[in-house]
Image: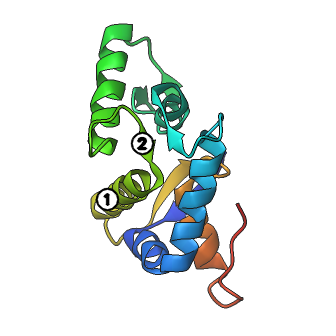
Amino acid sequence: MSVELIDSTMIINFIEEREEFAFAVRCRFAELDIDQNSVLCYSEMLKEFQSLRLVETDFGNDVKTNPEVVANIYSSLLAKFDHNSDGVISLEEYMTETKKMMKDIANDIGFMPIEMVLEKDSLLMKAVELHHSASAAHTIDC
């Protein structure tokens, strides 16, 4: 993890770099697809949900949350990603919802840069890396 300055423009520019964004999302999907069956089940998505730190509430300190509440949050997210309600997430579903989620984050952040703790391989970190390499070749690694 590292602390980075990020704003909505960085995220939107990353999304608009369609090839870069699609590549990063495909890489993340492949990392999550442990059994390599080209879809994500609940247990595989759980890793992604946990990386979002949805229940972290106090400046980097995780608090004890009722397991039932956590399960409900994760189930709701899975349902949001699972457009056709087949119990698994396809790459297309993952791509669509990830893009929406990134746009929502950009809207919440706004145009003033903020400091944010980012996971090393997160999509938000990829947005920061792309921004920093804007004068270079516009490439990112998985």
The amino acid marked with disc number 2 is Ile
- Label 2, residues with CA under 10 Å away: few <14, some 14-19, many ≥20: many
Q: Residue at x 43, y 11 (%)?
A: 64
For label 2, the SS is strand
In the rendered view, would you say 109 is above or below 112?
above
Q: Residue at x 54, y 32 (%)?
A: 44
* Residue 66 visible, this orientation: no
The amino acid marked with disc number 1 is Lys
Residue 133: % across, % down: 67, 81
Q: Are marks 1 and 2 in contact (CB under 8 Å)?
A: no
- Relative placement, left or right, of 74 versus 52 is left
Q: Quadrant of residue 136?
A: bottom right
In the rendered view, would you say 116 is above or below 86?
below
Residue 9: % across, % down: 40, 76
| Marker disc for residue 89 | 2
Residue 123: % across, % down: 54, 57
Q: Quadrant of residue 25?
A: bottom right
Q: How is the image coloured?
A: rainbow
- Relative placement, left or right, of 1 versus 12 is right
Query: Quick one: quadrant of the N terminus?
Result: top right
* Residue 31 visible, this orientation: yes
Q: Residue at x 50, y 56 (%)?
A: 115
| Marker disc for residue 100 | 1
For label 1, the SS is helix
Q: Nearer the viewer, residue 3 or 13?
A: 13
Q: Residue at x 35, y 53 (%)?
A: 97
Q: Label 1, label 2: how many angstroms apart (C-alpha)?
A: 15 Å
